[in-house]
Amino acid sequence: MKQKVSVVTGGCGFLGSHLCEKLLGENHKVFCLDSLITGSLENISHLLSNKSFVFVECDVTEFISIEENVDFVWHFASPASPIDYLKLPIQTLKVGALGTHKALGLAKAKNARFFLASTSEVYGDPLIHPQKENYWGNVNPIGYRGVYDEAKRFAEAMTMAYHRYHNLETRIVRIFNTYGPRMRINDGRAIPSFISQCLRNENVTVFGDGSQTRSVCYVDDLIDGIYRLMMSNNFEPINIGNPDEITILQLAQEIIELIKSKSKIIFERLPQDDPKIRRPDISKANEILNWFPKVDRKTGLEKTLQYFKTKING
């Protein structure tokens, strides 16, 4: 059977590197593209000796050139945490607009299927709960978070335009909060922040009063859902995430207890436009992809903790 060829933009990132691993396991040849602005070669170091894996350092907002035939283009390139896209606002907008355009252009030129990694942030600070795919969102386009939210909303619009105008096969996932090994210690998101603070016995920083909710999905479950979506016939956006909702304060308390840390919780001001609630309606993923998250939070947090221990304790 002929080996499929996949191009993964942002392949050195947290999710991109796990996707590269999955594709190699499914006997794909993988071209991993990354500018290394937020990605890390360390995330793919264990893949470099694989003959079916090729790393290309490049900026996907510029022309993407792959000589071989390509079957699948997976567009994951983007700063993805608030700490990144607040520091890199122009780059975030450019990779959502120009990067998506270039990646779609590659898929069109190669007659490949295109996959867009979108986000639950397209829903903004939602006014309905849980969030279904037919909800249009509540986004502040000129707020600090708008650079990420609107970049992804634009990327979805462009993907659908290519689908309708060029008859390109496209898939769109809306990713909800995901965690696991290879997250950066200084990522700025709740789980890596809480774990690293606890391992150092520092104060654990909770924004607001901690009553805002998140639904966190272990990375292996997410990647399984993403792969199923690409291989399905569904071209409309699908939520992939774990609907098990928890407050940020509860999450901090769980991690302190898991690590048996001496850390105390302190509260700081809630950032502007920070979503108050976040929980996916995954009925479409259940029905169309036969996908359900399998890893419970305690198991997932324990696996993530083992990774962070190697980074912080050496």
Image (tube, grey):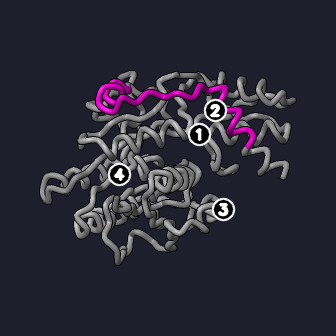
162 sits left or right of 29 in the view: left
Can you tell which of label 1 and label 3 is closer to the viewer? 3
Q: Earlier in the sequence, mark 2 or mark 1?
A: 1
Q: Is residue 214 visible?
A: no
Q: Earlier in the sequence, mark 2 or mark 3?
A: 3
Q: Residue at x 62, y 58 (%)?
A: 43
Cβ atoms under marks 2 and 1 closer than 8 Å: yes
Between the C-alphas of marks 3 and 4, the distance is 24 Å
> The residue under label 3 is which amino acid type?
Glu
In the image, the segment drawn in magenta is: 282-306
Q: Main secondary structure of the magenta part?
A: helix
Between the C-alphas of marks 2 and 3, the distance is 21 Å
Q: Which residue is disc 4 drawn over?
A: 116
Q: Residue at x 75, y 41 (%)?
A: 306
Q: Earlier in the sequence, mark 4 or mark 2?
A: 4
Cβ atoms under marks 3 and 4 closer than 8 Å: no
Q: Which residue is disc 1 drawn over?
A: 179
